[in-house]
Image (spheres, helix red, strand yellow):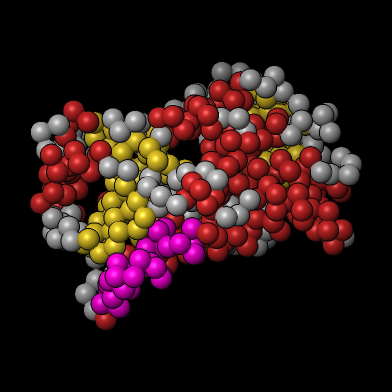
């Protein structure tokens, strides 16, 4: 097993987690190829639920992340136009029930901890400024490696794990080889991602009170919402929005990000309450970025021969459950378990093992992707009977403090499905039996 060579395409959250999980499982020949010249993670916030924290703890990096993260002990869901609270959900039980808290932190902190963890393992070699093309899928996959400042060369390897995101060229080629027609789909939504500093808000007591709370706040309106929370020891306030995709639709482009207009952003949320207007007005001119939200129809398979897909390469999701990175990290953890349990290292066994990985993961990720999309649709309802029914559910929850929450991210049953699942233990228990069922 130690001599098995694993090539990982991409050094984002999925790629770094996969490399570190494999190294922790005893693999010693791990090559990671990343097109960027460095990690380059910008300053967006990220939610880290217990299902993610459990794996990060196993990987030995949770102790570096948790101290400056903010423990989210509640969430408040409010009407965007009035700031009236529709529901207040207590999350203080989460740490005791699931063994880990639900925290929010800086994306760069998570990426940096994973990268530092990888650098401690001599068996992980990370090649920046390098593109990779899969030339053959098996029985020993061959890849073409193209350094930005060097000559291209070919590598024959045992396993290729594609962590190259929603734009995955590996996915495109895999589906092409299989004769499957599938493509990235526009969600019709875009997102502003903003960070305010504590000093920006120092003269606004109402906004400072939000920043000092251990709560996430979501303001909802027709086809739009805003979610905001503190991070980095409450020195930064992260704001993420969802609104109809106008800018990208009017100027189609291969890019998923664009420089946003502060004037346009304020216009999009002009019917939200005065506090929101003040909050958005604190955003410095020139620091508005807008992200296009894209998804992909469920794939018929993630595996071909000795090549597999991970994370956004195979199950990109809308952010309404805050599970995108978490599900990629679960993929990485499960791969490390099943590959370490292989009875031998033959190409046939590797293929069967990758298919077990898919069996363990695909139904769960497909379910969460669909649930995130459905939750977004309910949050964004306009005037009418459906919205009235949704708001009645919020009111019933506020009265009884139990029952269904229309915002599925805050629903206790959904939280149980997400956080109560130990994907590594599940893989250990099921691998042998699943492996036997495959021809």
Q: Position of residue 315 (x, y in %)?
A: 55, 54
Q: Quick check: is 399 in the magenta stretch?
A: yes
From the image, give the main secondary structure of the stretch colored magenta.
helix
Would you place residue 100 above or below residue 359 in this image?
A: above
Would you place residue 282 above or below residue 98 in this image?
A: above
**Going 29% across and 70% down the picture, which residue do you hit?**
399
Foreground of the two, 227 or 132? 227
Q: Quadrant of the C terminus?
A: bottom right
Tell me if residue 26 can be seen: yes
Please state if 404 lies on the left or on the right of 173 as rendered.
Answer: left
Please state if 202 lies on the left or on the right of 9 as rendered.
Answer: left
The stretch in magenta equals: 387-415
Q: Quadrant of the N terminus?
A: top right
Q: Position of residue 63 (x, y in %)?
A: 53, 29
**Going 33% across and 53% down the picture, which residue do you hit?**
75
**Going 16% across and 34% down the picture, which residue do you hit?**
201
Q: Position of residue 56 (x, y in %)?
A: 57, 37
Please state if 381 lies on the left or on the right of 285 as rendered.
Answer: right
């Amino acid at each position: 097993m130690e001599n098995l060579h694993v090539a990982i395409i991409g050094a984002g959250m999925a790629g770094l987690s996969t490399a570190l999980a494999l190294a922790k499982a005893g693999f010693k020949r791990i090559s990671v190829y990343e097109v960027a010249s460095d990690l380059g993670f910008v300053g967006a916030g990220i939610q880290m639920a217990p299902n993610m924290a459990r794996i990060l703890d196993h990987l030995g990096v949770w102790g570096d992340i948790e101290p400056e993260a903010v423990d989210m002990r509640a969430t408040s869901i409010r009407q965007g136009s009035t700031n009236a609270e529709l529901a207040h959900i207590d999350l203080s039980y989460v740490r005791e029930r699931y063994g880990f808290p639900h925290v929010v932190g800086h994306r760069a902190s998570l990426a940096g901890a994973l990268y530092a963890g990888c650098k401690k393992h001599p068996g992980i070699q990370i090649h920046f400024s390098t593109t990779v093309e899969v030339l053959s899928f098996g029985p020993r996959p061959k890849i073409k490696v193209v350094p930005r400042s060097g000559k291209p060369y070919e590598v024959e390897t045992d396993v290729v794990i594609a962590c190259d995101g929603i734009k995955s060229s590996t996915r495109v080629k895999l589906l092409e080889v299989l004769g499957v027609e599938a493509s990235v789909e526009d969600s019709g939504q875009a997102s502003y991602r903003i960070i305010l500093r504590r000093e920006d808000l120092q003269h606004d007591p109402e906004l400072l009170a939000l920043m000092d709370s251990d709560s996430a706040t979501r303001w909802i309106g027709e086809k739009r919402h805003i979610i905001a929370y503190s991070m980095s020891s409450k020195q930064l306030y992260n704001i993420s929005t969802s609104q109809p995709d106008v800018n990208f639709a009017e100027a189609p482009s291969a890019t998923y990000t664009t420089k946003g207009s502060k004037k346009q952003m304020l216009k999009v949320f002009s019917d939200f309450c005065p506090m929101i207007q003040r909050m958005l007005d604190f955003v410095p001119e020139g620091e508005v970025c807008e992200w296009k939200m894209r998804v992909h129809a469920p794939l018929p398979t993630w595996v071909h021969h000795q090549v597999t897909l991970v994370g956004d390469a195979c199950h990109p999701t809308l952010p309404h459950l805050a599970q995108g990175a978490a599900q990629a990290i679960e993929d990485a953890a499960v791969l490390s378990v099943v590959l370490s349990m292989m009875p031998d290292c033959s190409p046939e066994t590797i293929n069967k093992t990758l298919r077990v990985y898919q069996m363990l993961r695909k139904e769960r990720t497909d379910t969460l992707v669909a649930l995130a999309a459905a939750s977004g649709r309910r949050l964004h309802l306009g005037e009418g009977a459906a919205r009235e029914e949704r708001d009645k559910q919020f009111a019933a929850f506020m009265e009884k403090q139990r029952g269904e929450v229309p915002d599925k991210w805050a629903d206790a049953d959904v939280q149980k499905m997400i956080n109560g699942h130990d994907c590594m233990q599940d893989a250990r228990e099921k691998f042998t039996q699943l492996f036997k069922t495959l021809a």
